[in-house]
Amino acid sequence: MIVASILLAFAIDRGYESFESRSEETAILAGLRADFVANRAALEAHLEWHDRWAAGIATALEYTRPGSTVGVDDRTVLAFEDFFANPTLDPSTATLDVVESSGRGRLLGDPELRLLIAEWRVHTDDAVDQQAGLQRNRDLMLWPALTALDLRTPDGARAAIDPPDGLPGPEALRAAGLPAILDLHSALLVRTRGDWVEVLDATVRVLERLDALGAR
């Protein structure tokens, strides 16, 4: 009887630990899903901004081209104002950080999910590094060129350009070398956007796996 009671106690204890582990894993999966749903929305909005910025660069380059028919209208002014914006993205890893820092990574028992999250981490690190390069180009080349042309940001964040006198003519912009600076910035923007697209694709794959595992 004593031996049977001890074995029963061990069995109950193991069962309770197993129940706790399953409950904790369910909570972790739900937290991950919430984080990745938020990341997907943030990435989609960020990519829309990249598209707007790319269109603005195209407009500005066309404005500076000799013989261009693009004038100083609201679209052109908005393009130059947007160059002073500084949109960045830092995807949420709140649940992942808690899981990893607490040593509870073992509770993510699905190998495919762990692999997808690892791949997502790699893509995110690449995109954040590329984003930093884009910011350095903006800080060291684009913004100094714009301020040298007396296009300034009174509030430190956005320009307030009052057409037609507030925007220099195409000749002045070409003389300042702005087309070459915009070309380089555009190339960096394309690379950065491509990296964020990879992060978005990886985010969708993680969410699909979480849904397959029943995360809610």
Image (tube, helix red, strand yellow):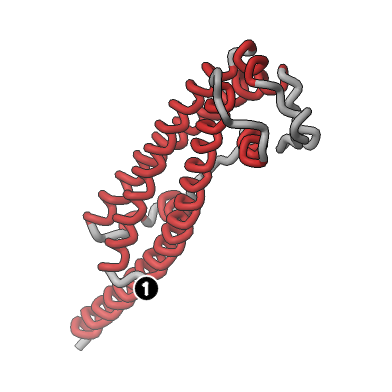
Residue 98 placement (x, y as % from top left):
47, 54
Q: Is residue 107 visible?
A: no
165 or 37: which is nearer to us? Answer: 165
The quarter in which the N terminus is drawn is bottom left
Rendered image quadrant of residue 76: top right
Q: Is residue 160 visible?
A: yes
142 or 110: which is nearer to us? Answer: 142
Residue 81 placement (x, y as % from top left):
67, 36
Q: Given the current orientation, which residue lies at the most extreme top position?
A: 175
Rendered image quadrant of residue 21: bottom left
Residue 126 placement (x, y as % from top left):
39, 34
Amino acid identity at mark 1: Ser
Q: Is residue 28 left or right of residue 61?
A: left
Q: Name the residue located 48 percent from the left edge and 59 percent from the top edge.
A: 38
214 or 190: which is nearer to us? Answer: 190
Q: Name the residue located 48 percent from the left edge and 21 percent from the top edge.
A: 184
Q: Is residue 1 above or below residue 136?
A: below
Q: Name the residue located 76 percent from the left edge and 37 percent from the top edge.
A: 160
Q: Which residue is mark 1?
A: 23
Q: Secondary structure at mark 1?
A: helix
Residue 88 placement (x, y as % from top left):
55, 40
Q: Given the current orientation, which residue lies at the most extreme right position?
A: 154
Q: Name the residue located 79 percent from the left edge and 37 percent from the top edge.
A: 155
The quarter in which the C terminus is drawn is bottom left
Q: Is residue 35 left or right of residue 12?
A: right
Q: Is residue 140 above or below residue 26?
A: above
